[in-house]
Image: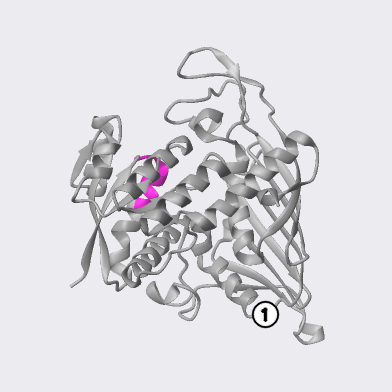
Amino acid sequence: MAKPLRIGMIGYGFMGRAHSNGYNRVKDFFDLEYLPVLQAVAARDAEKAQAFADRWGYQRVETDWRKLVAADDIDAIDICTPNNLHAEIAIEAAKHGKAILCEKPLSMDTAEGERMCAAVEAAGVPNTVWYNYRRIPAVTFAKHLIDSGRLGRVFHYRANFLQDWTINADLPQGGAALWRLDAKAAGSGVTGDLLAHCIDTALWLNGSMTDVTAMTETFVKERVHQATGKKEPVEIDDACSFLCHFKNGSLGLFESTRYARGHKALYTFEINGENMSLKWDLHDLHRLEIFDYSDEGPERGWKSVHVTDGDHPYMANWWVPGLAIGYEHSFVHQVADFLAAYAKGEPCHPTFRDALETQQVCDAVLASAKSHQWVPVGGS
């Protein structure tokens, strides 16, 4: 019989739903030593938190996250709050010996992330950050191909993440729904929200970056803040582009914006190697585009691999070959991997320490945009 891992979730927004779905679905498709029990959810609004708990199956509601973190009937804390609360909650949870699953980005900046890493490592508690795109089967399959050496020497990595939901000067900043537009809650704009995903995937697939040069733009300079009702300066980046050098000698090109009209969530990456190139698109997330130079000449060309067979990553746990899964399943996979690692006493990547490297890149990008100079990653 499976052992329980009692989950205490803090926050109940979009990511709270995505994580809760992962916890609820994992038992139906993965055979695991531990299974999640939705023990409690904490949020300031008791009525909304109770509605969330009733829908997803949490056993009780707390309005003080500190009480939840200290509770004896909680084994793991899931942090689904705005970014400015990640560090305080994670450090306190580590003091109480809780396993921690934290939404991305890890922290507001590198210094804060260092304190979080120090706390979980000193306490010896399991920890992970929800960079879920790693666990889309086509992306994981790309990782397998790269690690097997099929690409040979890598020359280029490029990625973008484009949205259009803030193209409205009347859209306010701050508050429960729009905290991502408030630098005090979010830390940064598209860099920490969207590019962080691109950076995490790039570091996982192609290794560390050495330095970056970047530019950012804030297209709407003032917005009404929902907390004050007054127009205040907008301090987040609406768009960001940067170039980088990877330690393996390849070059990187990244772009993200919330001002690409017509794009709701266009996330793509391409990696070009000496022997093979790979392309992936979130809009067609179950496919990996592959160009293999070893193919016979007349038949050589790009091919689209439908990543749904039982020998593809994760797919043996789902349906029959040819039937695709979706975005939400990446969270099920992360839950499954975390529980498997928890049972073995092994780290579940990306750990806080892994995610700190992404934060270091984000900080270097923002510093470069401000200074108009190349900036080393991690101050090296």
Name the spot of residue 278 as percent of width and height, x first. 68, 69
Give the extent of the magenta segment.
12-19
For the point 26% across and 48% down, which residue is it?
56
For the point 70% across and 39% down, which residue is it?
367
Name the spot of residue 41 as percent of width and height, x first. 27, 42
Dominant secondary-structure state across the stretch colored magenta? helix
User: In the image, is residue 17 part of the stretch drawn in magenta?
Assistant: yes
105 w.r.t. 122: above or below:
above
Based on the displayed image, in which of its 4 quarters is residue 337 positioned?
Answer: bottom left
Residue 182 shows in this picture? no
Name the spot of residue 288 as percent of width and height, x first. 61, 69
Residue in front for this viewpoint, 357 or 45: 357
Residue in front for this viewpoint, 169 or 145: 145
Mark 1 = which residue? Answer: 149
Q: Report helix, strand or loop for mark 1.
A: loop
Name the spot of residue 121 as percent of width and height, x first. 42, 56
- Report the quarter where the N terminus lies: bottom left
Left or right of 47: which side holds 236?
Answer: right
